[in-house]
Image (tube, grey):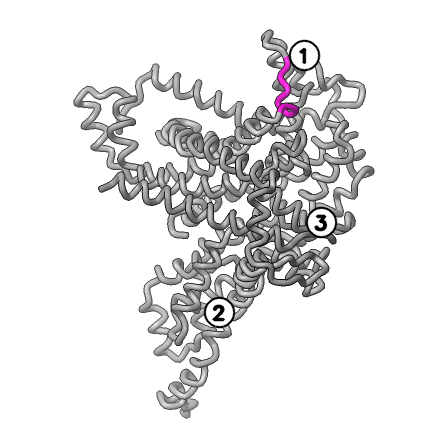
Amino acid sequence: MLMPSTGPRTRAVRVRRQLPTSPWLFAAPGLLVIGAFILYPFVSTLVNAFTDRRTLIPGEFVGLANFRELLHDDMFWIGLRNSALYVLGVVPALVILPLLLALLVQKNIPGITFFRSAFYTPVVASIVVVGLIWVWLLDERGLVNSLLETIGVGRVGFLSDQWLLLMSAMAVTVWKGLGYYMIIYLAALANVPRELHEAAAVDGAGAVRRFVTVTVPAVRSTMALVGALSSVAAFKVFSEVYLMAGPSGGPAGEDTTLVMLVQRTGTGLTGRVGYASAISVVVFVVTVALMLLVLRADRRGES
Amino acid sequence: MTRVRRGELVLRYVLLIAVLALTVGPFLWQLSTSLKGPTEDIYSSPPTFLPQHPTLHNYERVSETIPVWDYAFNSLKVATANVVTNCVGAALAGYALARLRYRGRRVATLAFILAMLVPVEGIIIAQFTTMRELGLNNTLIGVVLPGCIGAMNVLLMRNAFLNLPYEIEEAAYVDGANVWQRFLRIAVPSVRGTLAVVAIFAFMGAWDDFLWPLIVLSDPSKFTLTIGLNYLHGTFANDERLVAAGTVIAVAPLIALFACLQRYFFRGVGEGAVKG
């Protein structure tokens, strides 16, 4: 019987013919997308920051004019202040609370998978849904105020006072993020040897003591990771504040965050693309700095 | 096995139920509000948790106020497209980065890592002007394009392919299977788990996204659900029952998806956070 001759030589030819082209064919769609819609916009943001480009006008090179203007722009300082406050308010809560929650759901007791899943539900919901749920809950006549009135505290203007509004938005961010970081901590806790806990328990260490001396040191690199992730996300906050304070950022715009300012300044037919890009550059610089800061603090703590 | 003492067990359940009320309660309150009829007082103090005469009236009214089903359909289109492009694009690129030998592979890997690190919120204005130049502003394609092959997904797929034993593919190579056959018949079926994670997070990301569609879509007939809800909230803010019905429509599909496929959600968090 005659077999079709696919000897080693023809195969080698075929393989060689594919090699130069097909790897690039495989990678091309991905490279094209990130090139055109991530890397190119990134570079063009850096370039635009030094121009007076507008949505409909190409604009010209203006040197550092945008950055000089930023220094005297009250709205920019308000945005920077609020975004920075957001980091300070949200990050400690998102580093610690999910860890406690993970400890609570770690032990396999009946029904625990239900609780784990339920605690994750806010992560799955869109931030718009979450924002609107809380706008209604914290409304002047909403559920929280009804409850506060019932127990005799009286009604609180969560969404009308500038600072209460910012804090409410922070609480919503924490509420939505809890389940996400809980899962990260659960993975880390699974790697903590049980013997450590048992040894500490035998030595008579109470729950709090064991938490501080065993759990925290064992998950500290995860805490640093959560700190880095949550601080970067917190600094770039947009949706929560936008939904709760409104597009103009609450009373007299006092609750505007930096990304809200980017969105407001740079979009629309009269958008100041150059100026918005300069604000974006500030966002880049601060995010990178935050990430390095947290990760360095972790390394120093280890050595 | 460590045995849990009785008192500790009770304390644990008390805490679990308290957190449960805090995390799931708000969704139930929203559901309850959406089912309350126009004559029922939704502002009462003390509050009434259950609707006295449950009705679907608000769901009818919300679809008369905004084309909520069209918006849901737009969201579905965007999310489905995002799943397909991310799965196909990330599997292809991830395979190229993990398995294929070619010059420039390190540069390509670096490009994806850099792209993953770029904060999207910082480049939205430039993405917006890019879309304008392409004439894709105010289209659903414009909504999908920037995230249609996420750099993080590519790197996730790369890691998944790297973790496969190379010997099987080598054997197939010796048997004369070409690169497409090895990719489709051997490599992809072995990384289905990671592919499922990519698919689920692509769906959720697109369905839930707010900032980018808010910027790129201006014509109310093209809105996705999240933008439509924001519009509903801005225009008809006084009718909480309507907004509640709208949010329930937006969140129900995802909660159902999550209930069915939770282990992939949890896996995605682990892989995305640790390896990404």
Quadrant location, the N terminus of chain B: top left
Mark seen at residue B45 = 1
Residue lying at 53% horizontally and 53% vertically, measured from the top left:
B199
Chain letter for the residue marked with disc 2 in the picture: A
Residue B115 at x, y percent in the picture: 48, 58
Other-residue count near label 3 (Cα within 10 Å), few / some / many at <14 / 14–19 / ≥20: some
* Discs 2, 1: same chain: no
Label 1's element? Answer: loop
| Picture quadrant of residue A202 | top left
Q: Looking at the picture, which amino acid does disc 1 mark?
A: Ser
Q: Looking at the picture, which amino acid does disc 2 mark?
A: Ala
Residue B148 at x, y percent in the picture: 58, 59
Q: Is residue B245 magenta?
A: no
Residue A184 at x, y percent in the picture: 40, 40
Residue lying at 48% horizontally and 44% vertically, measured from the top left:
B265
- In this image, B178 relative to B54: left or right? left
Label 3's element? Answer: helix
- In this image, A302 relative to B54: left or right? left
Q: Which residue is mark 3?
A: B73
Q: Which residue is mark 2?
A: A27
Q: Please identify, in this view, whether the residue under mark 3 or under mark 2 is nearer the observer.
A: 2
Residue furthest out toward the left: A203
Q: Magenta: predominant secondary structure element? A: loop
Residue B276, compared with residue B17, is above or below; it is: below
